Amino acid sequence: DTEVTQTPKHLVMGMTNKKSLKCEQHMGHRAMYWYKQKAKKPPELMFVYSYEKLSINESVPSRFSPECPNSSLLNLHLHALQPEDSALYLCASSHTGGRTPLHFGNGTRLTVT
Amino acid sequence: TQLLEQSPQFLSIQEGENLTVYCNSSSVFSSLQWYRQEPGEGPVLLVTVVTDGEVKKLKRLTFQFGDARKDSSLHITAAQPGDTGLYLCADYNNAGNMLTFGGGTRLMVKP
C-alpha cells in the first residue's frame, strides 16, 4: 500500500460541476505535488507546495485551484473543467531540501463529460 | 529546459528474455531517478544514481549511469510478467525543486 492516499479513486464530473481531489500523507514530508498524467504519457508537473506555500505553478489554467491546508493535506479544487482535462491526477510528497525521491499516491482517475 | 528521451517507447517480450532500456538527456543529469509505474498505480522509485559511471543492482535489475552524466540504462535479466509496467527516468532541475520525467518505456512481458 502507498503511504500517500488519494481520494476519490475515480471521479466523473460535468463541465459545470465543482469538485475536489484530496491527498494525505503522514510521512512528515514538507513538499507536496500535483501531477497530471494522460493515457500513455509520463506525469506532467502542475503544482509544488513547499512548507504549505505554493512554490511552483506550471502555468496551469485557473480552473484548477490547489490548496494546502496543513503539512499533511493537499487538495485540488476543480471548476468548469473541459473534456480534455480528463486524466489521472497524481499526488506526491517528498522531503524538502536536496533531490529526494517522490512518493506517489495511486491517483484519481478523472473523467469530464 | 532539460529534455529526457527514453527508448524504446514500447517493448513486448517473452518471459525469460533480457532487455535494456535507455534514458538520454539534453543536458547533464543532476541525479537520475528510475521509477516503475504499474497499471492503475502511481510511479514507485526503483533507484537513484548520482555518481559518474555508477552501477547499481536491484535483484534482476541493473542500472548504469553514464560517465558523462547524460545517459543511463536499465537492464533486466530474465524478465518476468511482474516486470510489466511503465519505466520512467526522471531528473531534477538545477534549482532542485522540480522533477521532470522522460517519456517512458512501456514494457510488456508475456508468460
Image (spheres, coloured by chain):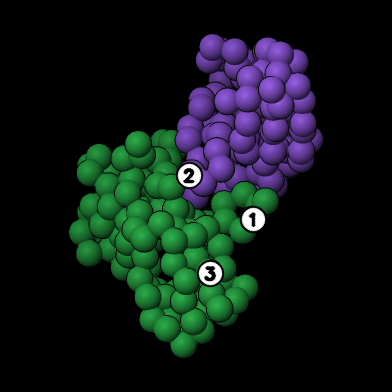
Quadrant assignment for the N terminus of chain A: top left
At mark 3, the secondary structure is strand
Q: Chain of mark 2?
A: B
At mark 1, the secondary structure is loop
> Which is closer to the viewer, label 3 or label 1?
3
Amino acid type indicated by mark 2 = Gly
Amino acid type indicated by mark 3 = Thr
Q: Chain of mark 3?
A: A
Dot 3 alpha-carbon crowd within 10 angstroms: few under 14, some 14 to 19, many 20 or more: some
The residue singled out by tag 2 in the image is B42
For the residues beneath circles 1 and 2, the answer to whether they share a chain is: no
Dot 2 alpha-carbon crowd within 10 angstroms: few under 14, some 14 to 19, many 20 or more: many
Residue B89 in view of the camera: no
Q: What is the quadrant of residue A84 in the picture?
A: bottom right
Residue at image location 61% in from the left, 35% down from the top: B85
Q: Which chain is green?
A: A
Residue A39's label in the rendered image is 1
At mark 2, the secondary structure is loop
The residue singled out by tag 3 in the image is A111
Q: What's the distance in space between the residues labelled 3 and 1, CA to CA?
A: 12 Å
Amino acid type indicated by mark 1 = Ala
Image location of residue A108, percent across then percent down: 44, 58
Image location of residue B40, percent across then percent down: 51, 46
Relative placement, left or right, of A90 versus A21 is right
Q: State the residue in front, B111 or B68.
A: B111
